[in-house]
Amino acid sequence: MPLILATTAPGEPEIFASLQGEGPSAGQPCAFVRLSGCNLACQWCDTAYTWRFAGDNRPHRDDAHYDRAANQATLAEADVATRIAALAQPRLVVTGGEPLLQGAALARLLAALPGMAVEVETNGTVAPHAALDPLVGQYNVSPKLAHSGNPAPLALVAERMAAWAADPRAWFKFVIARAEDVEEVLQLQEACAIPAERIYLMPEGRDSASLRTRAAWLAPLCLRHGFRLSDRLHIHLYGDERGT
Ligand code: SF4
């Protein structure tokens, strides 16, 4: 099976160079590849074009539907590897959608990119494919809290949460929109034994003003609980745009 990628324009796969905007590698120059398809449906998702295709009526704040043919590109792994290598970046970020849904094809892609540091962004519900896992240096795990609108049994899989908590490559990045979200993080931290130093709180927001407002009230909470604060650098630099 080839890889199914998101697109920046019909037929144009979303493969690009940018600075990582979130989490432990923020600010680092990277190549990015965005895979299409997700097993969740977050109501504030800023990449709904990777999953909310015609006929999918799960709630989303924009209530937009996307044409699958225009928003997906199917490419052989070798072709994707060539495009990534052409960006000449030392580090690769695999994002989505939910990239681990395409674990076997992703493993073949990474095998074709030896020497590249690789981080995978995931919602934390899917176990990495056995052939993929040894090729990944960092997981950015973003479990979805109640305000995402996903049913908890789908979004917070206890066995997976425990496995990520035990994996020192996994950094937890929680999207925070309201005070109750931090309480939920604290409960998950205790229930899943997540080390505080591997937890990031990141403000929900698709514009700089919202991010700054929420970061201001998150900062003291990070100090109190020993968490880290993540910004969304790419939003400040480029806005909420594809391919950035
Ligand atoms: S898990 Fe990520 S890609 Fe999937 S719906 Fe939620 S925010 Fe969007």
Image (cartoon, rainbow, N blue to C red):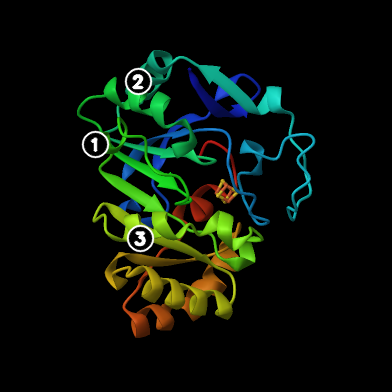
217 sits to left or right of 163: right
Amino acid carrying label 1: it is Pro
Q: Nearer the viewer, mark 2 or mark 1?
A: 1
Q: Position of residue 155 (x, y in %)?
A: 55, 56
Which residue, as the protein is rendered here, is positioned at the far left? 115
Q: Give the image quarter of residue 158.
A: bottom left
Q: Is residue 182 above or below residue 51?
A: below
Residue 162: assigned label: 3
Q: Nearer the viewer, mark 1 or mark 3?
A: 3
- The span from disc 2 to disc 1 (Cα, nearest Å) is 24 Å
Label 1 CB sits under 8 Å from any ligand 1 atom: no
Q: Give the image quarter of residue 6.
A: top right
172 sits to left or right of 51: left
Q: Residue at x 32, y 70 (%)?
A: 193
Q: Residues within 10 Å of mark 2 (few under 14, many from 20)?
A: few
- The span from disc 3 to disc 2 (Cα, nearest Å) is 37 Å
Q: Residue at x 58, y 62 (%)?
A: 152
Looking at the rendered structure, the number of numbered marks drawn on it comes to 3
Q: Give the image quarter of residue 186.
A: bottom left
Q: Position of residue 232 (x, y in %)?
A: 47, 57
Residue 134: assigned label: 1
Q: Is residue 20 above or below residue 23?
A: above
Q: Position of residue 176 (x, y in %)?
A: 53, 69
Which badge, 1 or 3, is on the more N-terminal residue? 1
- Residue that badge 2 annotates: 86
Amino acid carrying label 3: it is Ala
